[in-house]
Image (cartoon, rainbow, N blue to C red):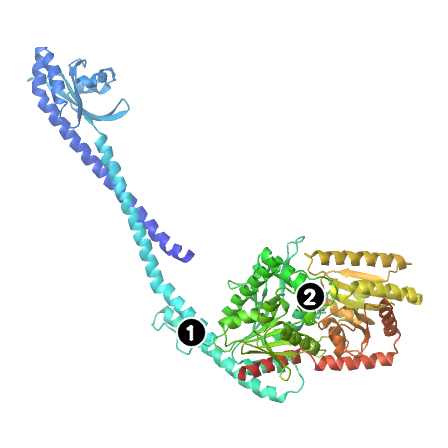
Amino acid sequence: MKRILLFILPILFVVTVVFTVFGVVQRRFEQEKLLDDLRRKARAVAESMELSVRQSLKSGDYRDAHYIAEKFQARERLQGCVIYDKEGAVVAVTRRFADWKEKDHPYIAGVIRAKQPHAAFEEFKGYSVYSFVFPVLDENGDLLGVIEVIHDTSFVFARLTQIWRQLSVALVILIILIALLALLIQWRIFFLPVKQLTEWFYRFQKGEGDAGPPIRDKGELGKLAREVEQVALSLRVARRVITDEAHVKLQKEEQWTEEKLRSLIHARLGENPLVVVSNREPYTHVTDEATGKSRCLRPPSGVVTAVDPIMRACGGIWVAHGSGNADRDFVNSKNKLGVPPQDNRYILKRVWLTKEEEAGYYYGFSNEGLWPLCHVTHTRPIFRDADWQAYKEVNQKFADQVLEELPAKSPFIFIQDFHFTLLGRMIKEKRPDATVALFWHIPWPNPEVFAICPFQKEILSGILGCDLVGFHLQFHCNNFLDTANRLLECRVDTEKFSVNVAGKETFVKAFPISVPGGQGLAPVDPAKIEKIREEYRLRDKIVVVSVDRIDYTKGLVERVLAIDRFLELNPQYRRRIVFVQLCAPSRVHLKRYRDLATEIDELVDKKNWKYSEEGWEPIVHLKRQFSPEEVQPFYALADVCIVSSLHDGMNLVAKEFVASRKDNGGVLVLSRFTGAARELTDAVQMNPYSIAEFADAIKTALEMPEEEKKKRMESMRRVVNEYNVYRWAGSILTELSALKKS
Ligand code: ADQ
């Protein structure tokens, strides 16, 4: 629009100036013509009166003069006549113009003196009239008197106004015509070709067709089109080469690494980008209200921890809710940006939600409904119709955004978590050729529990729109198959582990999620560890670390109670041990979460007060969001790490801690109710609901012989390194691409 205005406005300006100058000249010309006409008419009247008036003035009998003044005023546009004697006194005046006598006529004296005609505009009763004064002379040239002929001038002004009106209308029509013409020309020679070129490039890079660009002329646009064609071709060739190389590499490598996953993705997905969808975005921009400065943060989320390394390795597009208060400032016109910010490896596409949508879909249905429904933590799920409505609408919004990004042929979409149970079906309705996987990051409950959800059928049917559904544990898969079997009309195949609804088959498999493993981790700077020891007075202390979001599933209250019991039963540890808990606030708009945060604050205060002595307090409660880089030194200095979840799909903190301990030091105390407990069997496992057992597990961890600690950590590290997140993603993608062929 700005470009069009820049083009049209100067033209319109020039046209307007030329037209105005022309109008002024034309008006002046017309005015002079009309006045000249008036002067000639007035003179003609005066001259035709002259003879009769001379007689009358000579004779001194002014009755004739009155008669003449009345008779001549009937002429065209003549307002009246006045006859003066040679002294300038009025002798006769047209009757309806009698008031003229009262008017001051200084010009009459001038005419008497100079014996020359005089013409001018005069004001009379608020009107403008034209006065022509003509001297009447005798045969000797002596003045007898004066005739004044007064003409109506309104027609002159009416005519001039009419000229202006006509010129203005013509100008407006001309401006409209020029603007339309300019738009048409711009459209034809600029917009249309550029639009065609953009559409062609968009289709070409999505893999739709091989035809050359639509512009073939030799002009500048033609040159641009040829350059764009070169870029598009190079892009295609490069992608093909990568795919071929990837096939070769894949056959060589044994251990799952970033490199191997990249090869797998290029081999299986070919030119297509992997499209990931999640609610939580991997990078969020937040403006600090105090300083006004924006920062880019990595949210504390298991989904982000697991999926970000995969996207870094393979590239692609990640579609997620833009929830940061400065997010809009960092996206391009398509709401996209390259991430990580300093080292762009993939594209993040942000989807905007209104406050109402976020309240209903995220806080309401997802976090007050599905989250407690799937976790056995005895928090009552709340299902509101309005939240369900918002949930459906947001799923559709995401579906539309994802559909925009899909390549022409065989797209792969990898959906994350319980926020998008309907998305798979929505995408498949529009793109049946797409291969869609959903990974469920939290536990799946048994059918009796799931049956309390009023929208159970829609949710199950939405999930079964996908081709593959992944859970952390076989146990969750079994629960899901049981649920589908009981609540839906479907056929469950326990050989293949699939659900068939009206001819559509969905495979259900366990893929235990993980972290990248220890190989790629940079060693922690000892200075950072020292700084933390200094800051939190941890020198010469036994340090027990925990890292969680503040969530009722994570067993934070139980942990404080277990610490209390441990210190009660083992007073020899007082002043020697510090429990550092990194707690990231989460879902703070929900009362349940705010209440929990307050409960923990109060409990920590109470226990710290109970045991504090000589400046020592047992618990350091750090309530804020830490970056992954900030968390690493805490893992490094920990003698023990506690994961106390009451119920957890997997729990990546447990695996992160293990992966980070290249020194094979530290002991993991792990809740039996995490998915990770199935793999990390060398952790000290406990039931966090049993405070006594929990306290005992802390003691066991602290007093474990060094040799055993090392052995256990080594064994756990082998598991985490081998079953790392690249294997997790690799298995899912291998499974998906196998489905594609069948
Ligand atoms: P979450 O419930 O988010 O994940 P988890 O698996 O422990 O739980 O992952 C949390 C991630 O956030 C970790 O990477 C951790 O380092 C980070 N984090 C947590 N608290 C933090 C803090 N205070 N400061 C900084 N970082 C913090 C969900 C499921 C899990 C499942 C994952 C992945 O609930 O069961 O393991 O998805 O599938």
How dense is the environment of label 2, judged by Cα within 10 Å: few (below 14), some, or many (20 and up)?
many
Q: Where is residue 61 in the image (x, y as percent from the top left)?
A: 9, 10
Q: Residue 146 appears in which quarter of the rendering?
A: top left
- Kind of residue at disc 1: Glu
Which residue is at 52% across, 73% downward? 428
Residue 642 x, y percent position in the rendering: 80, 70
Q: Residue 373 carries which label?
A: 2
Where is residue 171 shown, x and y percent of the image? 29, 47
Which residue is more in the foreground, 651 or 259? 651
**Quadrant of the rendered image containing residue 586:** bottom right
Labels in figure, total = 2
Q: Tell us which disc is closer to us: 1 or 2.
A: 2
State ligand 1's quadrant: bottom right
When the figure is inspected, residue 181 is found, relative to residue 502, above or below; the finding is above
Is any part of residue 238 visible from this angle? Answer: yes
Q: Is residue 21 left or right of residue 500?
A: left
Residue 486 placement (x, y as % from top left): 64, 73
**Left or right of residue 608: residue 643:** left
Task: Determine whether, in the image, residue 573 is placed left or right of residue 224.
Answer: right
Residue 434 sits above or below residue 621 on the image:
below
Helix, strand or loop for disc 1: helix
The residue identified by callout 1 is 227
Compared with residue 742, is residue 124 higher up or lower down, i.e. above or below? Answer: above
The reply, left or right, for residue 714 in relation to residue 567 is: left
Q: Nearer the viewer, residue 77 or 274?
A: 274
Q: Tag 2's secondary structure?
A: helix
